[in-house]
Amino acid sequence: MSARAVIFDLDGTLVDSPAAITRITSDLLREMGHELPDAEIRATVGKPLEQNLAQLMGLEPEHPDIVKAKTLYRERFGAYVRERRGDLLYPGVREGLDRLRGRGTRTAVATSKTLDGARKTVRATDIADLIEALVGDDMVATGKPDPEMALHAAGLLDTDPERCTVVGDTVGDIRMGRAAGMATIGVTYGVGEEAELLASGAGDITDSFAEVVDLLLRENP
């Protein structure tokens, strides 16, 4: 039987980036004439960048201002990640991933970032060696909460969906995992609130990455 696998979200689950995403997006939108509350911007974290910008700016995705905003955002966020590097990880992430890999657990990331953006982030934060597979939003026809991304990750890891667990901080992550027939763990240290994660069907809820690892190893001793 194939080894157990874990499919992690990236922003808000492994990488402590929601506050930076909100700040960078807010500053960028203000420069382009769109003043929005931080809460409205933060609520979009975990969804594809183009979709978020179009929603927040009230424009079609192909509008020149969206193209400009995407370019500027990626430049600024990339610079931020390169500056912070491993410090951007939530406490215990690198140690926890290393512990999982040491126990034979296979690991993937499924993110609403593009594949290129995901690669840059895991490399800059020094966890690329602990993640076996990456699935970006641009690799699938339909993103979260559709199960396609999770199922694609399971395929890359050569692991049956029922032997996979999805770990994420948003309703979209949990719904994706459940739709794919996978176990789910919701984390409350990112964007999502405990009540909404439970309502979306999370099998377990935790407020620390260390406990995520404990839960995973308890399920797969």
Image (cartoon, grey):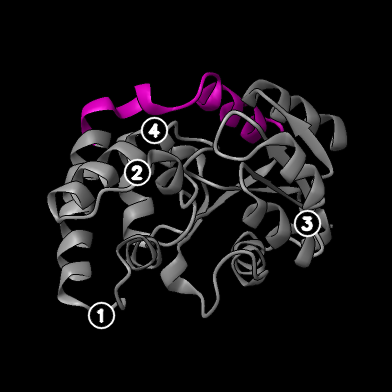
Residue sitting nearer the eye, 28 or 183: 28
For label 4, count other residues whose C-alpha is less than 10 Å away and answer few (under 14), some (14-19) or many (20+): some
**Label 1, label 3: how many angstroms apart (C-alpha)?**
43 Å
**Label 1, label 2: how many angstroms apart (C-alpha)?**
25 Å
Give the residue pinned by disc 1: 62
Tag 3's secondary structure? loop
Tag 4's secondary structure? helix
Tag 1's secondary structure? loop
Give the residue pinned by disc 3: 2
Q: Are marks 1 and 3 in contact (CB under 8 Å)?
A: no
Residue 196 locus on image (x, y percent): 73, 45
Give the residue pinned by disc 2: 121
- Say which quarter of the image contains residue 176: bottom right
Q: Are marks 4 and 1 in contact (CB under 8 Å)?
A: no
Please give the range of residues in magenta. Answer: 82-103
**Label 4, label 1: how many angstroms apart (C-alpha)?**
27 Å
Which label sits in the foreground, 1 or 2? Answer: 1
Q: Are marks 1 and 2 in contact (CB under 8 Å)?
A: no
Residue 91 locus on image (x, y percent): 52, 19
Examine the rendered structure and indicate whether residue 154 appears above or below residue 120.
below
Give the residue pinned by disc 4: 19
Residue 93 falls left or right of residue 39: right
Which label sits in the foreground, 1 or 3? Answer: 1
Mark found first going from the N terminus, 1 or 3: 3
Mark found first going from the N terminus, 4 or 2: 4
- At x 68%, y 69%, the residue is 147
User: Across the whole image, how many numbered discs are drawn on residues?
Assistant: 4
Q: Please state, as top left, top right, bottom left or bottom right, where the N terminus lies in the image.
A: bottom right
What amino acid does circle 2 point to?
A: Thr
